Amino acid sequence: MRILSALDATFVYLESEHSPMSIGAVYVIDAKDAPDGFSYDGWCALVKSRLALSNVFRQRLVEVPWDLSFPYWINDPDFELAAHLPKASLSKPAGMDELMQLAAEIWGKPLDRGRPLWDITFVEGLDGVQELSKGSFALVTRVHHAAVDGKASAEIMVALLDPTPEMRVVETQDDWQAEAMPSTLDVVSHSWSNAGKKAVDLAGFVGKAALDTINLQFDKNLKEIEPPPRLLSAPATIFNQPITSARTFWGRNFDFERIRKIKNSAHGSTVNDVVLAICAGGLRRYLDEKDELPSKPLVAMAPISVRGDVKGSGNEVSAMLVNLATDVEGSLNRLAHIHANTRRSKTHASALPANRITEFLPSETLAAAARVYTRTRMGGRHRPFFNVTITNVPGPTVPLYAAGARVHSAFGMAPVLDGLGLILVVLSYQGRLSIGINSCQQIVPDPEHMADCFSHALEDLELMISDTEPAKLLSLFPETAPEPPVRDDPLKTFHDASKALEEAIESLEKQK
């Protein structure tokens, strides 16, 4: 048995019938180079041959009675691959409209907790897309957010797909063994055995947090940077209301080179800054057309992966809040504001290990709080925590193949919640960048139109860049802009903080 982290467990507790907590993507696959006779059965055989590459495929959730502990993962004793590989057929000749609608319908249903929390729907009949060959198909993937974060989810699909048309032979030894379903006594006693370890971890966490807090107090560079937006400081918008289970979804591809050119012209900016500016400009246009644009700027939550090079399941993320400057006229001025906003948000986000704060809350308290919040539909009935989530997941720069058929496009999908009814999933793949628009029918009934707004925002930025004198660009984006202060190692932090504290005490004594 392996216990979930508090963050992973929170995704279990937050789930409801109208708010499934799954992440994944829609993969559009060109069948041009697929082997003759490739079909759904061939896909099932391929997945079966790759099961050893990720423990997520065959791990099942075990919840602890009365929430005395966070849930556990065990190796499912009743694993059946067929239950995770459903098949759907679109009425030919189907195009992107039909595919996006089907994906939204799939997305509106929770995964079955009685089996491993994932599935991949094989979609046939995608013959109405001009740039694809006849017989092309799609994969709609879902994995519970308790099992993976966005980066780990992408790694799972890389395990199933290949970097060349030739299917690789997986030589990883499959040493997986089923586990018997534990009894109530087993999970409760195992929970108590984790209490001592949690106490030790808490001591280390408190020490690290204390050192970082002291460092914050005496970091002169940090004091000079305006703090990022706070939770509950965002304006009310149509995106921040209770949701329904009727999902809407759309994806749009953008040439990555167009974004890179803007980044290079806006000295010091990053690709992420440009992507946020495109999203901000598109959201501003969308809301303005509906006469719903607030006077205050929208606030986005941007997850930050802290996984590094470590592979595996579970969530390894922190987050930052970013002012999207939707109150600023002019796309170029908005990009300059967003560039400054992301720099200070990253600085403050790195100051404390925020992604571990929930680890030391009692499981029953965390479960009760999450469930009360979900079941009472409180989301949308108070000031928004933030307005929109924008998550950026880097993908491969080379093409991927499913049984020899090239993956043409990938569009990310992620859960929405009451009060947080819009999430934009940004995926990069093979020289393109896609934005997946995830919402529900009553909030964004026209996601394709929102995608058009993002296209207009990119065009506006390109036009402004080409019409702006180099001297003006340098004034907006100085090449010598200072980087955010780098966090020191804990021992040096403690030494510097102690020295600063001694100096402060001496100064107070002199004043007396």
Image (cartoon, rainbow, N blue to C red):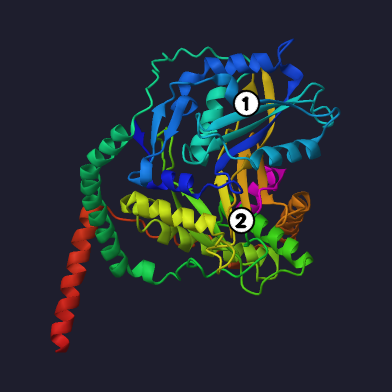
**In the image, residue 160 lies in the stretch drawn in magenta:** no
User: Residue under circle 2?
Assistant: 276
Q: Residue at x 77, y 55 (%)?
A: 456
Residue 432 vertical placement versus 379 (above, below)? above
Q: Earlier in the sequence, mark 1 or mark 2?
A: 2
Q: Residue at x 36, y 55 (%)?
A: 365
**Residue 271 versus residue 384: which sits nearer the camera?**
384
Q: Residue at x 22, y 42 (%)?
A: 197
How many numbered marks, from 0 up?
Answer: 2
Q: How far across and down, in percent of the image, does residue 331 sit? A: 69, 63
> Toward which corner of the image does residue 105 lie, by quadrant?
top right
Q: Residues within 10 Å of mark 1 (few under 14, many from 20)?
A: many
Q: Which residues are magenta?
A: 244-264
> Which quadrant is home to the C terminus?
bottom left
Distance in Å between CA atoms under marks 1 and 2:
27 Å
Q: How far across and down, in percent of the image, does residue 82 sit? A: 59, 20
User: Is residue 162 in sight in this rendering?
Assistant: no
In the rendered image, the residue lying farthest to the top is 36
Give the structural element (helix, strand or loop) at label 2: helix
The disc at residue 400 is 1
**As drawn, is 328 to the left or to the right of 486?**
right
- Labelled pair 1, 2 in contact (Cβ < 8 Å): no
Give the structural element (helix, strand or loop) at label 1: loop
Mark 1 residue type: Leu
Residue 259 vertical placement versus 277 (above, below)? above
**In the image, residue 257 lies in the stretch drawn in magenta:** yes
Q: How far across and down, in percent of the image, does residue 54 sit? A: 46, 25
> Which quadrant is home to the N terminus?
top left
User: Is residue 118 in sight in this rendering?
Assistant: yes
